[in-house]
Image (cartoon, grey):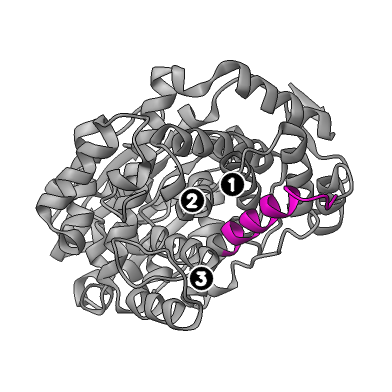
Amino acid sequence: MNTLFKDELILKTLVWLDEQDPLTNRSIFRQAQLILLDTLGCVNAAYHSSTIKELEENFSTYDPGPHAINNGPTMSTLSIAQLFAYAACWYEACEGHASAHGRPAIATISAIYPFAKKLSYRQFLKALVYGYEISVRFAQMLRIKPGMHVDGNWPCIGATVAVGKCLNLSNEQLVNAINIACTQIPMSLYLPISKGANSRNSYLGHAAVLGIQSAITAKTSIEAPDSAVIEYANIALGNKSPQWIDSEHFEILNSYIKPFASVRHVHYGALAAMELRTRVDITQIREIELEIYEEATIYCGNRSPKTAIQAQFSLSFGIAAALVLNHLNFEIYTEKVLFDPLITHLEEIVKIKINTELTNLGKRGAKVSILDHTQWHHSEVSSILGDSTYPMDENQIRDKFIHYSKDTIGQSMSKTICENILTNDLDQCFSKLLKMNEC
């Protein structure tokens, strides 16, 4: 049920979460573990990038502190949260939630990562679930304007709640912390993606930092105005009556984990192209048509990508790379692949059309048509691996984590961390599961 927003609705949801005790639900508990594992794998994969390593060195040099990733250079609480978030979304292989139109877990996990040494595994997962559930509900209410990007918007609220749980804030203090955050939610732009600039990857780190600061501030006597998000929705988004979806349903169960390293909108066309791959001669393709829902064309309409982030947000590149390589793993974001002559040619001939039926129904899906020689070949996709109705199974998620992590922490350690996250005692100190410094 949609209800005009007021603070009492947040409080009601927090009380409901307390009463449900989410980790007693086996499905919720497992999904939280899998999202955490997958996010850690995405972080590890980012260390293939010299930019992430350079960023790590700079944070360590100019903002020193006790925290590290994989026992690397140490830095402050706020810097490690930013570095973790940068790495988690670097190759665009991270989790997401369709109705949130974003990824609720990254800022949340990034914000509580610095607290790992003081938390049991149970406490860490509980903070993640609380942050996730509140984050999605704000995401459903705060739909961004064209030209904006979600990562610097509502994710800070999930981060605020998660850190607040780590600090043992009361529910009333959590509401105040949320209001502190809502008075300063930034406006993040889509512009860097269209221009091929990877500064977009800083947005979730900013959200994590704002969450940490808001929660710590709320532990003092500092107060924010009630229902601050109404003013934010009105001024920043032009939404004069923000609606809270008042449901007693765990949104984390609707999350998705990606099989491909690209924006979710790209997956539909890429999967359809892969299904056609054995039926066409890719060296003789004359025409390619993609029919897809309108939202995908708005966020992923980048043509002739010259940088990794443009390619991650490119429907046409996703189809071309899928046809040639039969995968969209994180390793494709190199100059060798971006400027491969055949991939470049195929990307240039992709014609994109909006499917009005899917758009009007609010559904996702794609149809790819390919002409080679004189014959058209067609493939339609309405559900993709990772959807809540078609989830990746645990073995696939384990394999993805090990593949993404092995070059950074080694094959043996990747398998050990994987088993620790999925099988170890919930009351054990969380940092021990990651083989970090002892608690």
Q: Up-down: is 45 above or below 103?
A: below
Q: Amino acid at mark 3?
A: Ile
Query: Which residue bears the numbered disc 2?
Result: 115
Q: Give the CA distance from mark 3 to mark 2.
A: 32 Å
Q: Main secondary structure of the magenta part?
A: helix
Tell me, for residue 416, which label it has, or none: none
Q: Up-down: is 287 above or below 252?
A: below
| Lower sequence index among marks 1 and 3 | 1
Marker count (numbered):
3
What is the span of residues highlighted in magenta in the rendered image? 206-223
Numbered disc 1: secondary structure: helix
Q: Amino acid at mark 2?
A: Phe
Residue shown at the point (34%, 73%) measured from the top left: 73
Query: Which residue bears the numbered disc 3?
Result: 193
Q: Give the CA distance from mark 1 to mark 3.
A: 29 Å
Query: Which residue bears the numbered disc 1?
Result: 163
